[in-house]
Image (cartoon, grey):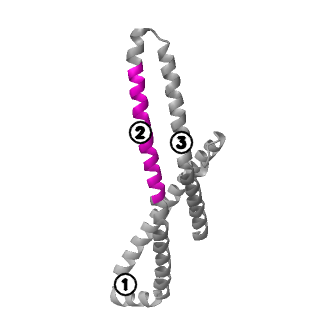
Amino acid sequence: LVLALIFVLALFLRELGVLARQLPDLEEAVTGGLSDLSVWVLSLIDRLPMGFRDVLSKSAAQFFSDSSLLLDQAFSYSLNLASGILIQVPDRALVLGTAVISSYMISAKLPSIRKWILIRFPKERLEKFLNTLRRLKTALWGWLRAQFKLMGITWLILTAGFILLRVPYAPLWAA
């Protein structure tokens, strides 16, 4: 399970890195397309009667200047987000490694921890506590399984839809 999770995480990070490298090219393409669209819309407005032309040309110029500013902010935010995620990977790997090692160390001492607990607590109280823990574990595990199934089905549907629409990086966008 851990290896599968690491594999999926590595695949996700690889796709994110490729996308981050292509974002500047995408920004250029979108900016070029936006300026072409602006020229085309303004040429259409120039063919209109004089009363409509003044109002619409001012509105169109304002719209395209605002949208280019918004586009610059969106790409800046996307690059910052991608770099922030990639920067945090070593820290998260350290946390995961520490958690695995500490879990192993605790499980190695589990028999002595059990003996200490059995000596310190009354049996009836301990049994109530263990029953409550079992019920909580069953309920939590059932809820988590349902959530993971729903997320998996949603991811599969989104991935299939993005692949049909020929969206690049379909699994990444679905995630």
Q: Is residue 175 left or right of residue 55?
A: right
Tag 3 residue? 28
- Amino acid of disc 1: Lys
| Tag shown at residue 70 | 2
Tell me the distance, in whole angstroms, between the alpha carbons under discs 2 and 1.
65 Å
Tag 1 residue? 123
Membership of 142 in magenta stretch: no
Membership of 69 in magenta stretch: yes
Mark with earlier residue (1, 3) = 3
How many marks do you count on the picture?
A: 3
Mark with earlier residue (2, 1) = 2
Q: Read off the magenta span.
A: 57-83
Q: Residues within 10 Å of mark 2 (few under 14, many from 20)?
A: few
Mark with earlier residue (2, 3) = 3
Q: Residue placed at 46% from the left, 84% from the top?
A: 106
- Amino acid of disc 3: Glu
Query: Toward the viewer: 166 or 41?
Result: 41
Q: Residue placed at 49% from the left, 66% from the top?
A: 89
x then y, percent, for residue 18: 59, 55
- Marks 1/3 in contact by CB < 8 Å: the verdict is no
x then y, percent, for residue 98: 46, 78
- Marks 2/3 in contact by CB < 8 Å: the verdict is no
Q: Visible in this render: residue 96?
A: yes
Q: Residues within 10 Å of mark 3 (few under 14, many from 20)?
A: few
User: Can you tell which of label 2 and label 1 is closer to the viewer?
Assistant: 2
Q: Residues within 10 Å of mark 1 (few under 14, many from 20)?
A: few
Q: Quadrant of residue 50?
A: top left
